[in-house]
Image (cartoon, grey):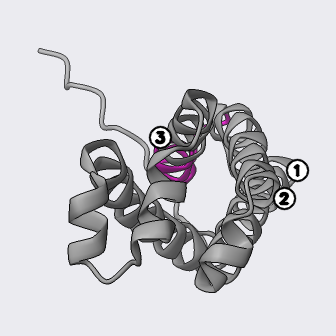
Amino acid sequence: MTALPVPQFTKRPLWLVLPATAALAWNVFGLWQFGGFLTQTQGSLVAQGMTGAQALAYTSLPGWMTLVFAVGVIGGTIGTGLLLLQRRLAVLVLAVSLPGYIALFAGDWAHGLFDILPTQLAILSSVVAIAGGSLALSLFAARRGILR
């Protein structure tokens, strides 16, 4: 009788696990925000504290911004999950996610949201920085031979 093969687990270094876990948590929160973005109305935004003008601007964004938000947040969530699983595919997925977030940032800037909602600049700057850091981490891990 032959024994079943025992799966080999590669030890995950803390320099990978800690930031990737934090980035995954951030992206899961982003998915929750994206769900709210899909269901928002002017009335619901005003009820959350926006002015009527802010709510109108936010709900009048073009459809392509919803698409790039989806690419960024879904890609970021899958990519950081793959990074934690030490999969090389994480690099590609995170390389697609980052331009989605950059396009979202550019769209918010072009449509004046940073002027209307000053906190939006800090939020999206953080989003782009975390997406860039996640991609850089995945590239570093790939170069170190940690990803398979």
Q: Is residue 111 rendered magenta in the image? A: no
* Position above or below: 52 against 69: below
Looking at the image, can residue 128 be seen?
yes
Q: Amino acid at mark 3?
A: Ile
Does the image show residue 84? no
Q: Quadrant of residue 141?
A: bottom right
Residue drawn at the location 70% of the way across and 57% of the way down: 108
Query: How busy is the neighbourhood of tag 1: few (under 14 within 10 Å), some, or many (20 plus)?
Result: few
Say whether disc 3 or disc 1 marks the residue closer to the N-terminus.
3
- The quarter of the rendered structure image containing the N terminus is top left
Bounds of the magenta span? 76-88
What type is the residue that disc 1 sits on?
A: Arg
| Relative side of 31 to 18, left or right | left
Question: Which residue bears the numbered disc 3?
Answer: 74
Can you identify the residue that label 2 sits on?
Answer: 140
Residues at marks 2 and 3, CA–CA distance in whole angstroms:
22 Å
Q: Which residue is mark 1?
A: 143
Earlier in the chain: of badge 2 and badge 3, it is: 3
